[in-house]
Image: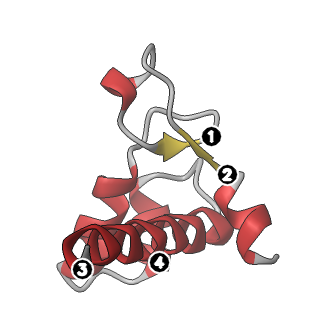
Amino acid sequence: MNREELLERISVDPSVCGGKPCILGTRIDVAIILDGLAEGLTPEQIIDHYPQLRTEDIRAALAYAADLSRENIWKIAI
């Protein structure tokens, strides 16, 4: 799956989870996945806790965070 396909797995909808970025078709927000990874959980452990997720969803969360990070750095640099 390429980056664009991964990012299509992320949904930002004001009527779902208050507009926080979530995995498409779920109410699992990207921050939950990133927090789990930051705590040292493996993608497999996160999927064990949230069986509706797929490995691609974990990769999508990382791709989204990378894009967001680049955007924040860009804004600061201006």
Amino acid type of the residue that numbered disc 1 sits on in the rendered structure: Leu
Tell me the CA gap for discs 1 and 4: 17 Å
Which is nearer the N-term, disc 3 or disc 1? Answer: 1
Counting from the top left corner in percent of width and height, residue 76 is at 20, 73
- Secondary element type, mark 3: helix
Q: Which residue is mark 2?
A: 9
- Closer to the chain start, of discs 2 and 4, is 2
Q: CA distance from mark 2 to mark 3?
A: 29 Å
The secondary element bearing badge 1 is classed as loop
**Residue 60: which disc?**
none
Residue type, label 3: Ala
From the image, state whether disc 2 or disc 4 is nearer to you: 2
Classify residue 66 by image quadrant. Answer: bottom left
Q: Residue at x 43, y 43 (%)?
A: 21
Q: Is residue 63 left or right of residue 70?
A: right
- What amino acid type is highlighted by mark number 2? Arg
From the image, state whether disc 2 or disc 3 is nearer to you: 3
Q: Report the residue marked by disc 4.
A: 43
SS at mark 4?
Answer: helix
Q: Read off the residue under disc 3.
A: 77
* Residue 24 drawn above or below residue 60: above
Mark 2 near mark 3, Cβ–Cβ under 8 Å?
Answer: no
Q: Are there few (<14), some (14-19), or many (20+) residues within 10 Å of tag 3?
A: few
Image quadrant in which you'd find residue 35:
bottom left
Q: Is residue 45 above or below residue 8?
A: below
Q: Which mark is residue 24?
A: 1
